[in-house]
Structure formats: C-alpha cells, structure tokens
Amino acid sequence: MEAPRRDTEKYMTEKCSDAFVDLGGQLADAAREVVMRYFRQPLGIIDKADESPVTIADREAETRMREIIAQAFPDHGVVGEEHGSERVDAEYVWVLDPVDGTKAFLSGVPLFGTLIALTRRGKPILGIIDQPMTRERWIGAAGRPTTLNGATVSAAPRGALSDAVLWSTSPHMFDSVEAERTGYSRLRESVKFVHYGGECYQYAMLASGQIDLVVEADMAVYDYCAHVAIIEGAGGVITDWNGRPLDLESGDKVLAAASPELHDAARRALVG
C-alpha cells in the first residue's frame, strides 16, 4: 500500500509567526526554571489514573506555561498532560508536556525534556524540545529550518535500512497488540542496531543527524506533537505507522525517519 504523502511545499510556505516562536521560547524558559529547581531533589511520586508517575515539577511547570499563554493569547486553546484541555476547537491550540520522561527525571537522568507545540487547525506549526539540564533547545517552526540553540541542524541518514540506527523509548510499548509487536520485531531485525530509553531526546538526536529512526507506540498527543515541526524542519519525515501526517487527532503510533526513503522502508517493515 502506498503511503499518503504530506504536502511539504504547502507546509514550508505556511510560516509560523515570530510572535508564536517568541512565546514558545518564553514558555520553555519558564518551564526550565521550575524543572531545574526540582531536578535531583527528593520528590514525592503521585500515581495518575494510568499509573504513570507525576511530580510537583510537572504540575507547577504546566501551570506556569498556561498562565503565560492566557496572558498573551487568551483565545488560544491548550492541551496539557497534567491539567487537561481547554478550547480545543480554537484555531490555535498549544500542546504541553512539562516533563516528558518523568521516570528518567525522577531517577536523576537527563533524558527528559519539556515539549511545547502549537497547532493551527489541528496541524503542528511549532515545536520545541527543551532539555533544562544540558541547556539545549531545539526549535522547529513551519517555514524555517530547525535550530539547536540558534544554529541550524539537519537530519543525516546513513543510507539503506540495513545501515540504520533505530531508537525507541521502551520495547514494552509494543507488547499489548500482536500486530504492533510483530511489525516492530520485523523492523528491529532489518536495521543495524537498536537502542532503548531515549524519551524525547531521541527525536532531537534524529533532527541533529545522530540517529536514523525513531519508532514508538502507546503515545499521547503531547508526547509527539512537538516533534513534528522539529523533524520536518530538519529534513526528516514523521508520521503515524501508515504514513499519515500527525495532528491533534492522530492515534498513538509514531514513525520518524531521517529521509523519505528510509521512512518508506521502515514503514513497509512495520505494516508488512
């Protein structure tokens, strides 16, 4: 089956405004200040309804970001991991994950980050990955190249699928559905090597030309939305497993690749 193709030319001409990029930076600054105050400190763990851990750092950082958005653009919507959704039918909706990789954060390991995205009519037009500990910030915005701390970065595929480096946060995210487990196993056997535990940092490394593929399942919208503009602005491709563009209504499966050719080869391995 031929994969649906994103209209890249239209995407690149639909430029994200400076005002939105600037506000995204302010949100990342505010979240960084909160997160670093709690990193590697004794923290209580609260179990959410889905049994994933959450800390005061997550909640406080998201609260602060929501306050800044409300002051700047009160008509914008917000979808956040910790405090739910507001005005999701608005033209512009911010998607926030204050600490993506909470388990790594709680363990004192700097493979976590703050994820910030802005969508227009459901489509991501801005994405930020901010790693507070290393002070690295990737920004992707429609109509602009992706940057790391202001310097342009780009994906750099090694070539064939057999030469590719594949990352996923955990092998267990593919366990619940047999077709996903089978497809991922097929892909894993087709690449050069596989590594686990990257959280959001693995997408940043793909955009920076360090790795070739990221494949994940069991994802929520705030887990992947920020990555779209970052990967695309670096010359990569990011979709669901069937090749459909990611937006506010996408499912839980993500395939990111350093080139269209690598993406297509990986997708065929996944879906059979």
Image: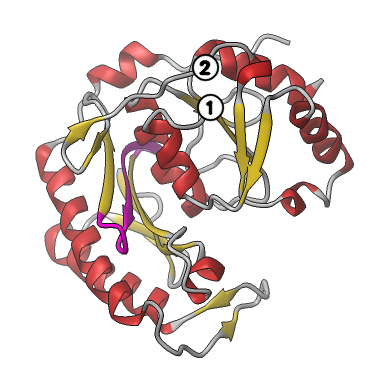
- Compared with residue 181, is residue 77 higher up or lower down, i.e. above or below? below
Horizontal relation, residue 79 to residue 253: left or right: left
Tell whether position 215 is magenta: no
Report the front residue among 137 and 79: 137
Report the front residue among 27 and 193: 193
Mark 1 lies on residue: 212
Mark 2 lies on residue: 158
Kindly identify the residue that appears in the image at 67 percent across and 37 percent down: 194
Mark drawn on residue 35: none
| Principal secondary structure, stretch drawn in magenta | strand
Tell me the element at label 1.
loop
Q: Quadrant of the C terminus?
A: top right
Q: Give amino acid for label 1.
A: Asp
Tell whether position 125 is magenta: yes
Kindly identify the residue that appears in the image at 47 percent across and 73 percent down: 108
- Compared with residue 165, is residue 163 higher up or lower down, i.e. above or below? above
Q: Are marks 2 and 1 in contact (CB under 8 Å)?
A: yes
Query: In this picture, which residue range is highlighted in magenta?
Result: 120-135
Tell me the element at label 2.
loop
**Residue 73: x %, y % from top left:** 17, 57
